[in-house]
Amino acid sequence: MIFLSEWIKACSSEQVKEGQLFGFTHNEKKILIANLKGKIHATDLSCTHANVDLSTGFLSDEGVRCPLHLSVFNLEDGCPQNLPAETPLTVYNIKIDGNDIYVEV
Ligand code: FES
């Protein structure tokens, strides 16, 4: 079976400045863009524990922290660093073209 991916525009770099989070939906797929120390990451937007919107969470050196039960997800591999979340977030490839950030979905 062949899985086709596509690159979609997520936002402009002005919308996710250093230390900021940005969430959006594309065809029912919910994606989080995070700018951690100038590096852009893309993961699932919904916490794997109880579907909370992680763009309302907190960004720190360890990753993105869910605002509800405070699990932190590593942005490189999506893995939760502490309970109660146990399932990793999906991590997406990103590319930057000029001022635009694209995600491979
Ligand atoms: S909803 Fe995110 S840790 Fe519980």
Image (spheres, rainbow, N blue to C red):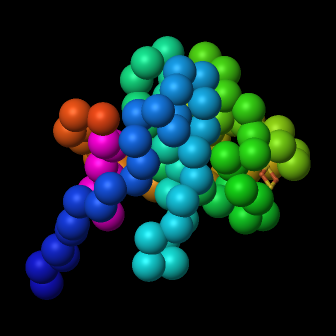
Q: Nearer the viewer, residue 4 or 14?
A: 14
Q: Main secondary structure of the magenta part?
A: strand
Q: Residue at x 65, y 59 (%)?
A: 46
94 relative to 99, above or below: below
Give the percent coordinates (x, y) of residue 9.
Answer: 32, 56
Q: Is residue 98 left or right of residue 77?
A: left
Q: Residue at x 61, y 17 (%)?
A: 61
Image quadrant containing the C terminus: bottom left
Q: Residue at x 40, y 53 (%)?
A: 10
In the picture as drawn, the residue positioned furthest to the left comes out as 2
Give the percent coordinates (x, y) of residue 32.
Answer: 54, 50
Which contiguous range is marked in magenta? 100-105
Image quadrant containing the N terminus: bottom left
63 relative to 7, above or below: above
Query: How many numbered marks appear?
Result: 0
Q: Quadrant of residue 80?
A: top right
The answer to if 104 sits in the magenta stretch is yes
35 relative to 23, above or below: above
- Residue 97 visible in the snapshot: yes
Give the percent coordinates (x, y) of residue 97.
Answer: 20, 38
Q: Nearer the viewer, residue 50 or 28?
A: 28
The answer to if 18 sits in the magenta stretch is no
